[in-house]
Image: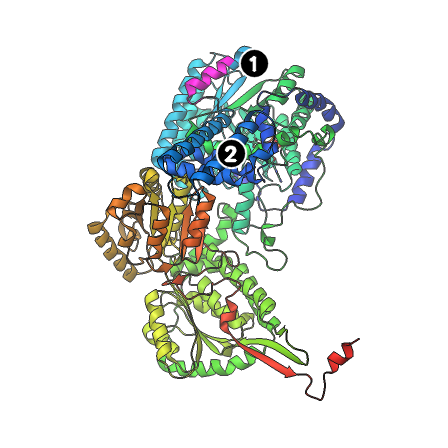
Amino acid sequence: MSLPTVTPAARLPSPLRDEAPVVQARLAALAGALDWAGVQALARPWVQAVRDEPAPFWAMESLLREYPISSAEGLALMRLAEALLRVPDAATAIALTADQLGRADFEAADGDGPHKMLASLSASAIALSKRFLPDGEHPPGLLQRLGAQTVVAATVRAIQLLGRQFVLGQSIGEALGEARSQRKAQPQLRFSFDMLGEGARTAHDAQRYLRSYRDAIAAIAAAAVAGAGPEANDGISIKLSALFPRYEDSQRARVFAELLPRVLGLVDDAAAADINLTVDAEESDRLELSLELIDAAAEHIAAHHPHWRGFGLAIQAYQTRAEECVHEVARIARAHGLRFMVRLVKGAYWDGEIKRAQELGLAAYPVFTHKHHTDISYLACAKALLDHADVIYPQFATHNAGTVAAIVQMARVRRAPFELQRLHGMGEGVYREIGRSEPLPLRIYAPVGEHRDLLAYLVRRLLENGANSSFVHQLADPQVDVDALLASPLQAAPEPGQPSPLRLYGRARRNALGVDLSIAAERAPLLAAVAATRVPQVAETPVSDIDATMRLLHAGQVAWNDTPLAERAAVLLRAADRLEAELPAWCGLLVKEAHKTLGDCVAELREAVDFCRYYALQAQDTLGPRELPGPTGESNTLHLHGRGVFVCISPWNFPLAIFAGQVVAALVAGNSVAAKPAEQTPAVAQRFVGLLHAAGVPQDALALLHGPGETVGAALVAHPLTAGVCFTGSTQVAKLIQRALAAKDGAIVPLIAETGGLNAMVVDSSALPEQVADAVVQSAFRSAGQRCSALRLLCVHEGIADGVIAMIGGALQELAVGDPADYATDVGPVIDAEAHAAITRHLERLDREATLLARRALPDGPAGAQHIAPCAYELARVADLRQEVFGPVLHVVRWGPGTAARGGAADVEALVGQINALGYGLTLGVQTRIDSRAQRIAHAARVGNVYVNRNMIGAVVGVQPFGGEGLSGTGPKAGGPLYLYRFCAEQVVTVNTAAAGGNAALLAGAH
Ligand SMILES: Cc1cc2nc3c(=O)[nH]c(=O)nc-3n(C[C@H](O)[C@H](O)[C@H](O)COP(=O)(O)OP(=O)(O)OC[C@H]3O[C@@H](n4cnc5c(N)ncnc54)[C@H](O)[C@@H]3O)c2cc1C
């Protein structure tokens, strides 16, 4: 399939724009279109009637009011709902139930139904956990276990009950049956079936979802009324992320080659049956890609099914470019002579969108930050959809009575056909009342699937029902009066509802500006810079020059140390701004010299910027003179100053961030710096040194010394003027430096060493396999495994090991291995031939001693010459992992009672003991839904950074100060509040203020 020359994406505005003007534009589009008093008059009786006559499932909504998701009880409920049904083993299920119910206080609530059930359940769970599981983990005896299992079984049933409210059937047959029976009472009711599940992580998952969609369409088609058309028949909703594991902008070539044909196959089936097929809306960074797919699908439909009017998609009003998206979809339909069915929703991933923008340091949020701005956008989009009635059949999906009434008002004027939609299990009361007064077509979005597949969906619904700002939540709260519930949203808020992603750290420190690579216009300057970059040659420093340079730096340190702290800090801030401004050029150099992928380059540059800003702030806050308390008649002042010449030796894997972090920390503390970069990456270092000089660091306070560690590095460490060494690299070299420093005559020279790790991830059987697979693939294979924080050893509970290993194996096959200059590449080459040879030797040993679980095929020819295929091997025991191997090689061990006979760890305590015994202590991943277990593991583990339920790489300056203990380093942690002190010498000046004959201050202050 050839890509269209002018893509729909190119027609959309950037999502990175200010919210306020967008809101004004939406309000302007709505000017005169709505009479809100009329809207309230229409909706008031619906709302009043619902409150007077609660719906059958009312209890769920009031349950969430009673236990809001912000409370311990609400959170416990959600956690259990998310995890309990998938836990395979009784011990973990008991621990999870005791952990979650034990911390909550369900007894506080009164009432009937689920309240009472949960209250009594939790009471017995708490009692049981207190009696049988005194410290929450030790295996109970048989009798106790039986008691605890009864509680767990009852809790499982309660969760299933909760889940059943949102699922129409466990199979499409069952769901169609249920739909039939609901139609007996309401013959006009239509359904859009949704086959539940997480997004696919593997090709196998994607095929499974494809089959389930095909089967569902066949079943819906068989039940459809011939000739009735898509408006009058049931339909299907599909998620593109379920049909393809890499539904991402970076993989667009594969998306069109592999995903599009699957979509077209489903389109053919739905068109043949003349039913509605809707493409669900997912995360905002997929919007452009999804529109291009829709365009391509439209071309296919125009060619093969020109009379079919059932193709559709969902548009999310919470996106700031939703209205432009509506116009674009109308344009596509018109261009192909089609009519689309467009479902307008507000959007289900608001929290995730806000988090992503903050993490990436984006210039703006892609979504509105006030709930009523989303409501304004929804109404503006609704108006636009109704105005495109010639090519769009609008499907308004909302549970908000005010929103429905506003739509009804606008549609009456235009007389355009449309339908309303709600989710199964939600909004029943409101729609019952709407149905009584306005007989409008209504379609129910009806999830279909087994309990295990329901969990993620269930949590989204719990969040939606439980959020304070949500209409259903407020409707259930009698404290909110009807006028407030139906208040007009039609005014802009004066302030953004969230601080800008760049103001995440408050006013004092700006977050480093990032790039959204999924936006072509943002990506283009980086790609251009990569293409234009040639790596400059950097001359090696002759060893004979080192002494002169050290003398120069030694002399220069005096004046630099005397430079006011504020000025030294200002130099760092200027450097940060310049780095940010030159982002594309830096990415070009990082790709070409260090073989980094584009995403890694942006992250690295941002880390360097953060280091500069963070240390500048820390220095000003903590390094100034400090008055100390003491007896009257004297003053005691602590002063910090630079130690002298600091030697900074950094590695190639973060040639900018680690290099910059070491150098600017030493400088801002008042040291001069002899900076020795890794031999593989001197050009990045040279450029950064140039940038610092341009930002105001004197030439005699900072010098670059490039050359081999054995000669240049060793000479620097051994030099008599060296006042401190800051080193990041292997444990082996750190030891050599330590010995060299100890062997020197003269002053005792401090060493700050950050070295490697045998980093493990502990996964218990309450973990979500999809989340584990994501975290493992990112942690083990991103940057080709060449991070000190990278995951080396996955320890997975035997109860879920087979499934998790299969999923990781499948996900690993989906990685794009190739040239880092290519935007699509996930895994680039390793740094050099020497590294390649060392990893290859390790793999040969693994081939003899371990079991190969999965290996990604390499690209053919020279493109793959310096690549190592991402792979995973199973070891029998933790202790079998003996050395850190800096490459995309994952080792896996199983743990659990069944592994003990083979030397495996029977329980999590034993496992952590085995990991500690490796002697390293850098990072640890933990994947569990048992909060107390996560805390206990963190407490027992002798490591510097513990990451619970996420990946374990990408520590952020000032947020996750980074560094370990034991064989992993000396501390203090880089990017942490204690780091700068280590670069300082301390001096206390004590002055006898009474020396001149008496204590004037004391006497003057006496009464
Ligand atoms: C039939 C149907 C199909 C659906 N399909 C999809 C789909 O394909 N993709 C998808 O993403 N969602 C989908 N949804 C879910 C939908 O997004 C939510 O159900 C909907 O947002 C809830 O809106 P409401 O009008 O019912 O409730 P309201 O309470 O009026 O609105 C709640 C919504 O407002 C938004 N919001 C909340 N807080 C803020 C804030 N601080 N700032 C800005 N906005 C905020 C969020 O979108 C939130 O969901 C679907 C819903 C239905 C009914």
The mark lying in front, picked from 1 and 2, is 2
Residue 521 placement (x, y as % from top left):
52, 48
Residue 311, numbered circle: none
User: Which residue is located at x 74 percent, y 82 percent?
Assistant: 1000
Q: Could you tell me residue 788's position as x and y percent?
A: 38, 58
Amino acid type of the residue tagged 2 in the rendering: Ser
For disc 2, the marked residue is 122
Residue 362 versus residue 237 in the image, above or below = below
In the structure shown, which secondary structural element does the residue marked by tag 2 occupy?
helix
Residue 28 in the image: above or below residue 439: below
Quarter the N terminus occupies? top left
Indicate the quadrant of ligand 1 in the picture.
top right
Q: Amino acid at mark 1?
A: Gln
Seen from the viewer's position, the closer of residues 600 and 67 is: 67
Task: Give me the C-alpha separation between circle 1 and circle 2.
Answer: 42 Å
Residue 68, above or below 503: above
* Residue 953 spot, x, y in % from top left: 43, 53
The residue located at (52%, 61%) in the rendering is 609
Magenta part of the protein: which range? 169-181
Sequence order check: which comes first, mark 1 or mark 2? Answer: 2
Q: Is residue 255 magenta?
A: no
| Residue 749 visible in the snapshot | yes
Residue 255: in sight, yes or no? no
- Nearest the viewer among 444 and 905 is 905
Which residue in the protein does label 1 denote?
188
